[in-house]
Amino acid sequence: MYTQGLNQAVEEGGPEDAELLARFQAKIDREEKIEPNDWMPEAYRQTLIRQISQHAHSEIVGMLPEGNWLTRAPSLRRKAILLAKVQDEGGHGLYLYAAAETLGISRAEMVERLLEGRARYSSIFNYPTITWADIGAVGWLVDGAAIMNQIPLCRCSYGPYARAMIRICKEESFHQRQGYEAISRLAEGTAAQKRMAQDALDRWWWPSLMMFGPSDAESPHTARSMRWKIKRFTNDELRQKFVDATVPQARLIGLEPPDPELRYDEESGHWRFGEIDWSEFNEVLAGNGPCNRERMAARRKAHAEGAWVREAATAHARKQRRRTAMAAAAE
Amino acid sequence: MADALTAAYALRLGDDALILSHRLSEWVGHGPELEEDIALANTALDLLGQARLLLACAGEREGRGRDEDALAYGRDVLDFSNLLLVEQPNGDFAQTMMRQFLFDAYAVALWPRLSASRDEVLAGIAGKAAKEAAYHVEQSAAWVVRMGDGTEESHDRAQAGLDLLWPYAGEIFEADEVEAALAEKGIAVAPSALREHWQARVGPVLEEAGLAPPEGAGVRTGGRQGRHSEHLGHLLAEFQFMQRAYPGARW
Ligand SMILES: [Fe+2]
Ligand SMILES: [Fe+2]
């Protein structure tokens, strides 16, 4: 029943661990939450640290492509919506770092791993936002795909992560609706606006499908993550859900996903789509996407230029403590 | 009913909020720490909300059918009436926070008084803005103290920000016939009446921070009359790009 990797871990840990592991699994099977002070297998802890920190980094790096249009939003209403959205994403990063910290890793360590290129963030943010329509497309497709992935995480077995996701999902679905509304407006607008909207869909469609990760046959950890209820659906199941939801939305506003093989399968009720170009996915993952270097350079620059600010805050706090102590001593 | 004076007054206050909000939005995603990034976005959002209400009010009182976007995106430099202070570039975090503090200290003096305006629309906007400004000034004052008191580097940067921006503070208290006439009617707050409150806010914070205003720095003014620094044109080129490139489109 257990996978190879887990059997080994249990053997290394001896019989006591086997008993702990059985109790841990039973708890998960009863749909009870694992909390920070509960015993958990090291692989569970490390899987969650990797996943939650990667998620947090994605929120932060994701602020960059959208922030790219904050100063050029075409109306004050759109500017306010975008500012609020980007601010929300920062907030998501904050809750997620906090959730990961409950597993025994500091935010500073996670950020360091990101800046040194040892931790990943979602590859989707390595694509550029070239026109205003990309802001609509990102909300509609990227936040839309994120929700598909994240709604099941609200029931994740790890309590702090599940609770963070409940709050985050509410905001993400709001972002998705706003993005769809923004691109709908373009699709019903002037010829130039329609062109912009279709072009954005052309560029974001396939990368959005890739957000669900490699196909099930290529994802080695899926079975274990599903048994631990970190994952509830496979990558391919979620991808299909996304396509089924999104194709009708595109057609409703007169846009067409860039896939000649796209067709509705009456029998299964699903939209069938063409082959995903995984070589592109792997290239972007390897650091060769259109904006990988820019995104990391921007994060490193902000971190480096912020160093004196963080030092000032620490130094001031230290001086304040000393002053308070001296005042107390003088009394 | 057209009311050119109130329109001009609302536009001045609206332009301050609009331009400062834009400057802060340039920071988003690039702040020194995640919490600060979020706080900068939050302040930018509050100011943008104030700007939208004030520009909408200005457009209505003007009576020429211009809405918030027509005013924000359809005017050139000469017709903007914001304080020179708010259009100054972000510079480093110290410069941004010093600009913010000098402005917030003014806002927190202005809005509670304007909330007693005999113009109900302005009074309503001011009441909302007063709460936001109280929060903003708490944050920016805390940063001025932290930076002034923190390390040698942060102190020097904060002092440099103060040296650079201090000459623009005098403009806050200037009044022309617009404010004079409206203050007389109980609609506007006379800017000169704010100086004392502003100083009472700024002085102790600078003292706690160990910072001193520059001597003999002079006063830079002209923003209220459309005489701006070189910076505003570049800001508008970016801010207004979409409306200029696609005239008449709806977004
Ligand atoms: Fe998010
Ligand atoms: Fe989002």
Image (spheres, coloured by chain):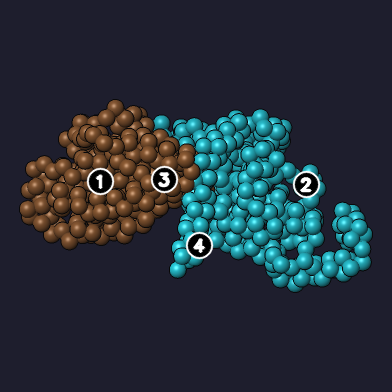
Q: Amino acid at mark 4?
A: Ala
Image coordinates of residue B60 in percent, x first then y, are: 18, 48
Q: Amino acid at mark 3?
A: Gly
Q: Amino acid at mark 1?
A: Gly
Q: Which chain hosts label 3? A: B
**Residue at disc 4, secondary structure:** helix
Image coordinates of residue A120 in percent, x first then y, are: 67, 42
Q: Which mark is residue A281?
A: none
Residue ID for mark 1: B14
Q: Quadrant of residue A158?
A: bottom right
Q: Which residue is at a point 50% across and 62% down the rendered structure image?
A: A325
Image coordinates of residue B203 in percent, x first then y, are: 29, 50
If you read the primary sequence from the N terminus, does the residue marked by circle 4 or circle 2 appear first? 2
Image coordinates of residue A52 in percent, x first then y, are: 66, 53
A8 to the left or right of A131: right
Q: Quadrant of residue B114?
A: bottom left
B170 to the left or right of A239: left
Q: Is residue B160 in sight in this rendering?
A: yes
Above/below status of A147 relative to A330:
above
